[in-house]
Amino acid sequence: MGDLFDKFQPLIDQREALLATGLTDPFNLVMEEVVSPTVAICNGQPTILLGTYNYMGMTFDPDVIAAGKQALDEFGSGTTGSRVLNGTYQGHKDCEAALREFYAMDHAMVFSTGYQANLGIISTIAGKDDYIILDIDSHASIYDGCALGNANIVPFRHNDVEALEKRLGRIPAGAGKLVILEGVYSMLGDIAPLKEMVAVSKAVGAMVLVDEAHSMGFIGENGRGVAEAEGVIDDVDFIIGTFSKSVGTVGGFCVSNHPKFEILRLVCRPYVFTASLPPSVVATAATSIRKLMHGADKRAHLWANSQKLHTGLKALGFTLGTDSPQSAIIAVIMPDLEKGAAMWEALLHEGLYVNLARPPATPGNLTLLRCSLCAEHSGEQVDQILGMFAAAGRATNCIG
Ligand SMILES: Cc1ncc(COP(=O)(O)O)c(C=O)c1O
């Protein structure tokens, strides 16, 4: 009888070989204490956090924390039910109102995670006879949403407008078409040419969904994302987002102006057949979202951090995922997994945490050290980070 775990053997072997070299497991780090949005204690040592999605540093905002504590006291620890049964509290409605205000859109639907928001919205609106045209580097939750709905999937080359247009031209006339794009692609930190992509999609009558998980709160005049920055937000049919990044808690959402949007609450399985978010979580999310509406100064500081880190890493001789900083993510490309893991560990010894990203999660089978900046990183911390990259890079022969 075949062991169903046999298919994992190559991964088990690769992992064991890596750990046999004496390397700290890069996928098993424990944050023993979290001091602030930018510092934690790891292995007993103060460590600068450069690998969280806490872009706007909201996790320790006093108003956000107070709102969560109050909701915990007044509404208890959990709803123990689905949004369509006993799991809609005033806090869930308020959180959806905050999202409608934030995006200036008619409808907002909150899910238990961003993953479930993609799973639910995509699988519900695009079914068996429909076509989903998506960037090949789309997030796993987008692919899983496509698979759950059983739609026909047509991938196109990453960020290639012409390829998208060609694929759209080959879809049978009259078929339902959904184009799925991301504002910021989280592996390399590059942004999508949304202006052109939305235009070619709309020209053939396709609906457009944009996942703004890594841009919400930061990119665009009001932090609404790349669609706002590129002036096409009114042409986008659905925006998907998450509370687990700039908002600083957990949860996901979809906002839309579609007049029939509310029917999704009754037919979207990943919304109906799961418990709703705890009252404390929706209270923290709503408070954070309302504060992000007034986050222009933080956004400006985060851009300055991103510029400084990008310029500094380039000057040190590292190869980066983008020629210029396009988001709060700066990816350092490593020659291979062994070097990447050694550099990751050397940085940790220096007192810096970054994300090690490896195939199959990465485009082009790249090994990346993904740096994600926070609006709460001070200029001095960014200088410190560059010093740590210089020391670790030299110690591991990644730079000369
Ligand atoms: C583009 C994108 N969409 C969706 C998600 C899922 O978000 P969540 O953490 O809320 O499940 C992620 C998370 O990494 C993401 O990068």
Image (cartoon, rainbow, N blue to C red):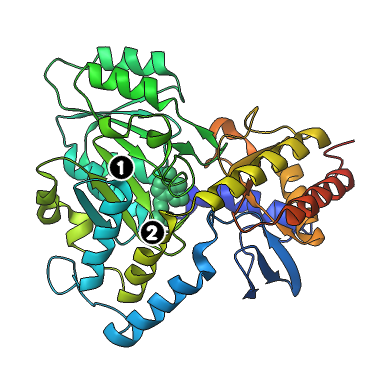
**Which residue lies under the disc numbered 2?**
289
- Secondary structure of the residue carrying tag 1 is strand
Q: Position of residue 134 (x, y in %)?
A: 35, 29
Query: Which is more toward the observer, 260 or 14?
Result: 260
Position in image of residue 241 (x %, y %): 36, 49
Which residue is painted at 17% across and 29% down in the image? 130
| Residue 84 appearing in the image | yes
Q: Quadrant of the C terminus?
A: top right
Q: Residue at x 21, y 65 (%)?
A: 93
Mark 1 CB within 8 Å of ligand 1:
no
Q: Nearer the viewer, residue 294 or 174?
A: 294
- Vertical relation: 273 (above or below) 375: below
User: Residue, x 61% and y 49% (percent of image)?
Assistant: 301
Residue type, numbered disc 2:
Ile
Q: 164 left or right of 175?
A: right
Around disc 1, counting alpha carbons within 10 Å, would you say few (fewer than 14), some (14 to 19), or many (20 or more)? many
Image quadrant containing the N terminus: bottom left
Say what secondary structure mark 2 lies in.
helix
Which image quadrant is residue 240 in?
top left
